[in-house]
Image (spheres, coloured by chain):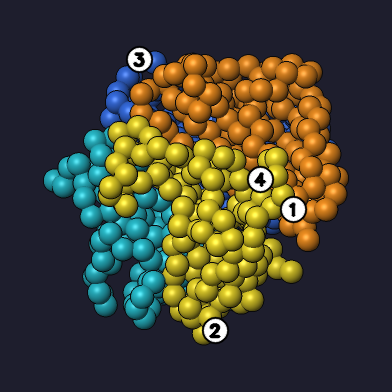
Chain colours: A blue, B orange, C yellow, D cyan
Amino acid sequence: MSIGMCRWAIAEGYIPGQSSDDEDRRFVSHEAACMLNASDCDAKVRIMLYFEDRDPVGPYHVVVPARRSLHMRFNDLTDPAPVPRDTDYSSVFESDVPIVVQHTRLDSRKDALALLSTIAFGENA
Amino acid sequence: MSIGMCRWAIAEGYIPGQSSDDEDRRFVSHEAACMLNASDCDAKVRIMLYFEDRDPVGPYHVVVPARRSLHMRFNDLTDPAPVPRDTDYSSVFESDVPIVVQHTRLDSRKDALALLSTIAFGENA
Amino acid sequence: MSIGMCRWAIAEGYIPGQSSDDEDRRFVSHEAACMLNASDCDAKVRIMLYFEDRDPVGPYHVVVPARRSLHMRFNDLTDPAPVPRDTDYSSVFESDVPIVVQHTRLDSRKDALALLSTIAFGENA
Amino acid sequence: MSIGMCRWAIAEGYIPGQSSDDEDRRFVSHEAACMLNASDCDAKVRIMLYFEDRDPVGPYHVVVPARRSLHMRFNDLTDPAPVPRDTDYSSVFESDVPIVVQHTRLDSRKDALALLSTIAFGENA
């Protein structure tokens, strides 16, 4: 069983540089790409980040194991470079098996939380 | 009349373990899969949950009657196992008739509510 | 020029029965189906509402004039029946010309606003 | 490498006329169309705005350079006319190379932020 597509894009991207609580990982302002790999093969995913005023950065390499979910925080990416805060970006995902990608942001710059989420844009190669 | 697809995936999934008000069902932090069955046949839906570090759990079995809407809270699932709180997951839906699935979360960990929603990713078998 | 599809579904639907401010229309808790008709012909749209425990209600009839946008509040529907508050529902839209439908909710039960939005699920007949 | 489609529509559109903080650009109520151009050619994008009770306004012309992201605020559009605040609208994007478009609103009329986002509706000509 597999479901999804092999190429995905998230046009929106912005990690707020402030959080109401920097100690509690749950409430740190963050962006996540939630990836589902329902297939029986590990998914090797290659991620490129695009910016407004500089060349793309990447690829980042992530593995989503067979029959697993991975909620990847862009905040945690480090290789080849961390994702700058308070900066507009977009991202593209290329996987060798079909996956499903959903984009979520939690913004805790104010005491109240704000959330957004959308299934990313998917297409096959 | 029917509309939709037979397989759906929600890559994001996370039920916050806290709520500002645990007594009032409306304000309990929750995630829902809203399912529309506009066809004239009952939809038998089979749901699998995927996690980051353990095997998939399911199937859960749900029926969406003909020409009915069902807003299913993941919080209410119990068989074969409840959905752990504060835990990342994804979900896949397989229906024997076309349905439409939309994902919604209400997060009331703070006094202010936060909402997210997206049409899930659909495909036909 | 036209863009879109002729059939759309919104699986989520829920008009909160309370608002922090019932006097100011902007801040009344509401759900909207935002419809874009970029074509040169008026769009006659037929809307059906689906519920969990009763038969579908409708059709509601709405016209989106040629080259116009219409942000229709479900709160304002009256014929053949108003939309019950605090009640789960889904909706299906059938148009005689291609349109684009987006679902939005503003929840003002608390002082802080909560918003959700998603492009609806579209297909052609 | 390119990903996306050449025509996109956002049916929802509304720039709140008030903000909790008018001095800090980050917290000004705004709507953005986030555009990703992952191709090797600059994307010339033509934007039309549609309203409820007046003729469409545009085209607005925007260039998304090759391999760049552009988070365009509707608030910043001026030619041929600024986007009226507190007014319902929709938008259509036509690009000469494939792009991906995502719609986001930040509403700061209250002290707490509210966010919404969705991938726009895309199709090829």
Give the Cα distance between marks 4 and 2: 32 Å
At label 3, the amino acid type is Glu
Residue C51: give its label: 4
Q: Which residue is mark 1?
A: B38
Q: Quadrant of residue B102?
A: top right
Element under disc 2 = loop
Which chain is disc 1 placed on? B
Q: Quadrant of residue D61?
A: bottom left
Question: Between D80 and B29, which is closer to the camera in this rendering?
Answer: B29
Q: Nearer the viewer, mark 3 or mark 4?
A: 4
Q: Nearer the viewer, mark 2 or mark 1?
A: 1
Q: Are marks 1 and 4 on the same chain?
A: no
Give the Cα distance between marks 3 and 4: 43 Å
At label 4, the amino acid type is Phe
Q: Nearer the viewer, mark 4 or mark 2?
A: 4
Residue A101 seen anywhere in this rendered image of the structure: no
